[in-house]
Amino acid sequence: MTMLPAGRPLVAPSFLSSDFSRIGEEIRDVEAAGADLLHLDVMDGHFVPNITIGPVVVEAIKRHATTPLDVHLMITDADRYLASFAHAGADILTVHWEASPHLHRTIHAIKDLGVLAGVSINPATPVGVLAEVLDDVDLVLIMSVNPGFGGQSFIPRALDKVRTLRSILHSTSQPNLPIEVDGGVTSSNAASLVEAGADILVSGSALFKSGDYAGYIRALRGE
Ligand code: DX5
Ligand code: ZN
């Protein structure tokens, strides 16, 4: 899978804010509008105070999707479920640093399943904790809200975290490692995130409420 087509940010609509009763149409519409990845938020009611979807729904979405599935696991004990999500059709599996006591093992378990491995950090977690895994992961997801719900306001400190991470990456084997930002991303803050070093913009409520998916995706890309 090509993660980064040359020269522009990728947009990953977060289906948490989509109309789940019309999920097939929503997938078709955002793909026609230019979505690069479909961002699926998996929540377990333990790591985060909300419950969403599991592998069965991911598999159903996969049947409608032509773009890669970017599966964001906000769950404890992710190791138990990695194979189920991989078999359901996840192309990227991102786990949380805060929920992964054996993160190095988890990252390699994801890669052994033939899936790209992402690691995410919450707003209160400094980017420095990732130092020992930056050579191993396929992307880093910086949370710009506290995970659990769509429609929250962007936490501005996330911008500095993106900048700091990009500068740390310059001294690793992966200076161009994709940085994804998730939470409160809108057409107003997208340009500054990209300028700071973000490559993948997740957008849920702002995009799905816009009424013009193609126009909003272009706006997020700064086109
Ligand atoms: C939050 C989720 C996000 C969320 C983004 O826990 O990980 O993906 O759905 O939604 P917005 O863009 O509305 O903040
Ligand atoms: Zn997410």
Image (cartoon, grey):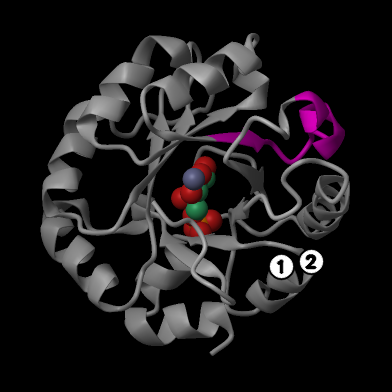
For this rendering, which residue is in front, 133 or 101? 133
Q: Look at 23% across and 76% down and name the residue there.
A: 32
- Disc 2 crowd rating (10 Å Cα; few below 14, some 14-19, many 20+) is some
Q: Determine which residue is flagged by label 2.
A: 196
Q: Left or right: where does residue 69 sit relative to residue 129?
A: left
Looking at the picture, how far across and down is residue 62, in whole percent?
18, 45
Q: Which residues are magenta?
A: 118-132
Using the image, tell me which numbered label, if any, was put on residue 40.
Answer: none
Q: Determine which residue is flagged by label 1.
A: 193
Looking at the picture, how far across and down is residue 137, in whole percent?
61, 34
- Disc 1 crowd rating (10 Å Cα; few below 14, some 14-19, many 20+) is many
| Above or below for 89 versus 16 | above
Check whether the beta carbons of the residues at disc 2 and disc 1 lie within 8 A of each other.
yes
Q: Give the image quarter of residue 47.
A: top right
Q: Give the image quarter of residue 53.
A: top left
Q: Look at 59% across and 28% down and name the residue there.
A: 96
Looking at the picture, how far across and down is residue 116, in whole percent?
46, 37
- Residue type, numbered disc 2: Ala
Q: Give the image quarter of residue 205.
A: bottom left
Whether residue 45 is visible, yes or no, is: no
Within 8 Å of ligand 1, the CB of disc 1?
no
- Residue type, numbered disc 1: Leu
Helix, strand or loop under label 1: helix
For this rendering, which residue is in front, 67 or 28? 67
Q: Look at 21% across and 72% down and name the residue there.
A: 29
Helix, strand or loop under label 2: helix
- Magenta segment includes 157: no
Q: Left or right: where does residue 195 sit relative to residue 43?
A: right
Within 8 Å of ligand 1, the CB of disc 2?
no
